[in-house]
Image (spheres, rainbow, N blue to C red):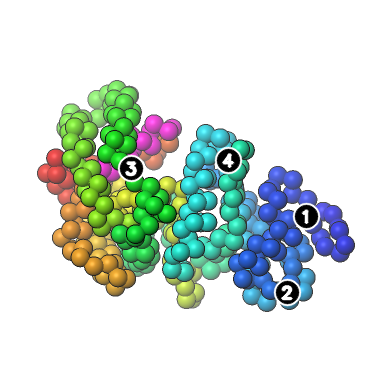
Amino acid sequence: MARDGGIVVMTLPQLPAVVEPAQLTAALRRGRVLDAGAVREVKVLHQRDTVLSHIIRLGLRYVGESGGAPQSLILKTAHAAFAKSLADAGRHEVAFYTQLAPNMPRGLAPRCFDGSFDEESQAWHLLLEDLTDSHVIATQWPLPPSREQAMAIVTTLARWHAAWWDHPGLGDTVGSWASAEDRAQHMETFAGHYDRFADMLGDRLSEERRTLYRRLIEHSGRLSQRYQSRRHISIAHGDAHIWNFLLPRPGVADTVRIFDFDQWRINVPTTDLAYMMATQWYPQQRQALERPLLNHYHETLMANGVTGYTRGALDQDYRLSVLWQITKPVWQWSINIPPLIWWNNLERVMMAVEDLGCEELL
């Protein structure tokens, strides 16, 4: 720790310059949460690694008037082991918080006070609202949520989808469209991964499932027409399992927040619902909650300004999205996600495909 003119500066050489008191002061003033006061001390309260990032909880102390200023913040940076190989995830998340989030309704995601991606070094950071004291993740992975928790999560997901539903900026100022050629190339890459995946599994992948994969690959162009219609489309989170949502703690009057936006993209919104339920939940939980949650999702869309999207259209989109989810375990395997994750995802989504009769779509 060093002192400079009475200002206490924690020596944090491994952290980006944004954590220096002067820069934090400027960021909080831009965010209109700090007026006349200034940050005088920064300290690391806690730090941990996720699969792709490093999360640091920073404690702040102020000099001068600081009423209402945050006492702590979350600093998110690249995980050192993946800083280069998965830099695009950081670029993507910084783009979300700096370009999309300012144009969304409040209370859907944590506030971002600063974000930057350096193309030369591929270093990046996000300085986010700390919700540790007010919010909590619904359950410990892999436990499913309660009905009440699931309803609250789907409410926020629907509000978020509604905010970008058929937005005029899609593909222009908000994200980019994948062309038919792009999607064909994507499926060609998938087909190569699938062949190696099937060879690795051997007789652990039944002939019925192999046929399902082959037919999906064969008909992928036709199935992609729903996306190519560019109608009833929004921004999908891309990784919307329940552990990427923060729920208010008991007694806290606040909204559920979504986080981890490194996989967002323009897509059919039911992609997120299918990943949340069909890929993550075993049949008993999914069958008990699936219909009520889809009903609630549709009602929330309508209440937030979405028009012309029928309940039947939602069912059709959801079944198609569940079918597409059989590709997820293969992609996960291809980037060395542990079998504990992809194998269970494979089993669950295949049971959902059977339950919902998704093979009929082929």
The reply, left or right, for residue 224 in relation to residue 254 is left
Q: Quadrant of residue 80?
A: top right
Q: CA distance from mark 3 to mark 1?
A: 46 Å
Would you name the residue on which mark 3 appears?
Answer: 178
Would you name the residue on which mark 2 appears?
Answer: 36
Q: Secondary structure at mark 2?
A: loop
x and y percentages locating residue 34 in the rendered image: 67, 71
Prevalent SS, magenta region = helix
Q: Earlier in the sequence, mark 3 or mark 1?
A: 1
Q: Amino acid at mark 3?
A: Ala
The residue range painted magenta reads 323-336
Would you name the residue on which mark 1 appears?
Answer: 10
Which dot, 3 or 1, sits closer to the camera? 3
Name the residue at the left extreme.
360
The reply, left or right, for residue 69 in relation to residue 5 is left
Q: CA distance from mark 4 to mark 2?
A: 34 Å
Q: Amino acid at mark 4?
A: Glu
Q: Secondary structure at mark 4?
A: loop
* Residue 333 among magenta residues: yes
- Kindly check if marks 3 and 1 are in contact, taking CB atoms under 8 A apart as contact: no
Q: Amino acid at mark 2?
A: Ala
Q: Secondary structure at mark 3?
A: loop
